[in-house]
Amino acid sequence: MVPLKSKWGKALRSLALVNPKRRLPARHEIGILSFAVVLTATVFYLDTFTDIHSALATLYVITLLLSAETLTEKGTLSLTAMCIGLAAFSYAVAHGLQADLAATLRLTVAVAAMLITCALIIRNQRARLDLVKFNVALQSSEERYRTIFEQSRVALWERDYSQVRTMLMALKADGVEDLGAHVRANPDFLEQCITRVPTVAANAAALELLGNASGENASSMRRFIAQNDATFLELIVAIFNNETHFEGKGSIITSDGTHKHVLLTVGFPEDPANFNRVIVGMFDITERELAQKALFEAQAELALASRAATVGALSASLAHELNQPLGALVVNAQTLLRWLDRDPPDLEAVARSAERIARDSQRASDIIQSTRSMLGKRAPVREPVSLVDLVGETRALMEGELARNRITFETRTASNISPVSAVRIELQQVLINLITNAIQAMGETPDELRRISVFIEPAAAETVAVRIHDSGPGLSADILAKLFKPFHTTKDTGLGMGLAICRSMLEARGGALTASNHAEGGALFEMIVPIEALDE
Amino acid sequence: MSRKPVIAIVDDDQSIREALDDLVLSCGYRSRLFSSAEAFLADDDRAAIDCMLVDVKMPGLSGIELQAVLNSQNAPKPPMIFMTSYRDERTRAAAMDGGAFAFLGKPVDFDQLVRCLEQALKH
């Protein structure tokens, strides 16, 4: 072999004999190759010109092995051919045509050794090439992933959920089936979980979302997750149930204290071992949520205003229409008494008065009837309404009010709630009214005891019951008696129409609204909503 | 009194008219019914009328406008008792300024109305 001087090197490279991606430094390589050349020459000399009875040619194998790193597949094949040629030449020179069985066997062994070595070297090289190719593909895939992760405008985190998963699986092994119930019984559990989710990495958008938090600050999400945020519980329930994906809405508090609504998406890895790097995505939907909330509020206000306006206009018009027949009735009745008081009573005149009284009463009744039927003509828009969703939406709508009054709000839902066919805005109006009343009823209740519990359950005769229980002082017998009367109010600014309207709205659709005191204290309002609303 | 006093009732509502008619009758007076201020003004025999019961709010001429028309005519005017569902002070003041005998709210207080009629007729 020749040392890789530039001329030779170039020539060999152009023949594609030399591996362009060698791993050894050039000086080191030249040393090895020089040794290989010297070794080959020595073996050739000894094999050709001495009479040592051994398979010296086998030592060419060392040459092959030494140059394996440097040569390509083609180079190795050529070198093998050359070594076999040298061995054959030496054999011919030393033994000529006199067939010496031992010498021939030695040659054969040497040739076989060289061929096998050659084959092994080539196989090894191919395997290595495959590995290198695979590594390159893996690297570029990793690079692509990094680019997506870093450059994405969606806030992304890599979080280590492995500890939490281990905790959850341990719970499962202990026989816990309902994680929600377990968390309710062990309020600290959620906290423990949150602190055991270290952040592995966060992209620029993620740090920006948290209010340009530095990487260190963001290492634990503890301080960013809003208190009472139910989303984290839902997330760990998803892990607990071995779900592959989680999506939910949550709220976070950025480093400057602003609340943001985020859409949270988490894809869980199939292999539990990969839970140490779970990708969590967050999308800031604060503005969308605020717009939606404003829309809801505007709708609710509009509904209330239009109802109040309707009630106002209606009562004014009714008062006006009824005034005439009622006025006539009073006069007729008094006149009738005068006819009776005469001596003798003028019974003919009494009969005339009585007839007019009957006629005017009928007229008053007709006015009321026609007003009702006029109202009935406005066909209400009914749609299927999920009471569970409606309660959730109403809660979201009133979140500010609830938070301001530091009220814990919980919803318990039976599993088999059918959607009801109803006028959505009417039901929402009733809910808003009842929740607002509950909030106001707890004004004097200590903060830590303020709680509104909403229970949604199927009730008798194809209805759904929504019960709203507060932890306020409850309703006195006096209030209970007058609660649903129009114009009864405990508020300085109230019209006192709220509960009266709520009850009449529900009753018009075949439902009901009742109030009582809960056995454990506090007021309990019960809405009964028929699954199929009645026609008026 | 040699003859029964005659009370004119001016009201657009038939029920009220008839009720007042009977009331007047039960008091021992006679009545004449008019369904509008215009009908009253068109009547030729107004001189025989001793007192008027007038609704304030009527289609066409209102009670107050009727009063103004009568005040502008050079003829004796019987005492006018106004009745209204709308108890606003401005209308009341306008009626009293125009020389109304009384201004009563509707539904009318029966005894008050009877007393009022008696006093007006003594005038």
Image (spheres, grey):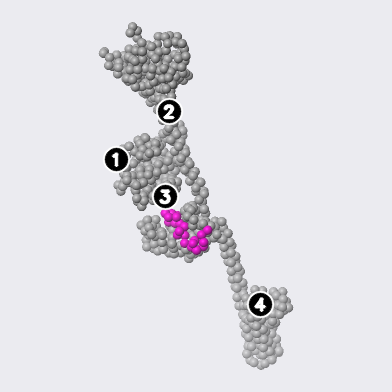
- Considering every residue shown, the one lying at the far left of the view is A343
Question: Where is mark 3, residue-wise?
Answer: A403
Q: Position of residue A431 (x, y in %)?
A: 40, 43
Question: Where is mark 4, residue-wise?
Answer: A71
> What chain is tagged by disc 2?
A
| Residue A477, numbered circle | 1
> What chain is tagged by disc 3?
A
Disc 1/disc 2 C-alpha distance (Å): 35 Å
| Residue A317, numbered circle | 2
Q: Residue at x 36, y 43 (%)?
A: A526
Q: Quadrant of residue A186?
A: bottom left
Q: Earlier in the sequence, mark 3 or mark 4?
A: 4
Question: What amino acid is found at the position of numbered circle 4 in the picture?
Answer: Leu
Per the image, label 3 sits on a secondary structure element best described as helix
> What chain is tagged by disc 4?
A
Question: What amino acid is found at the position of numbered circle 3 in the picture?
Answer: Ala
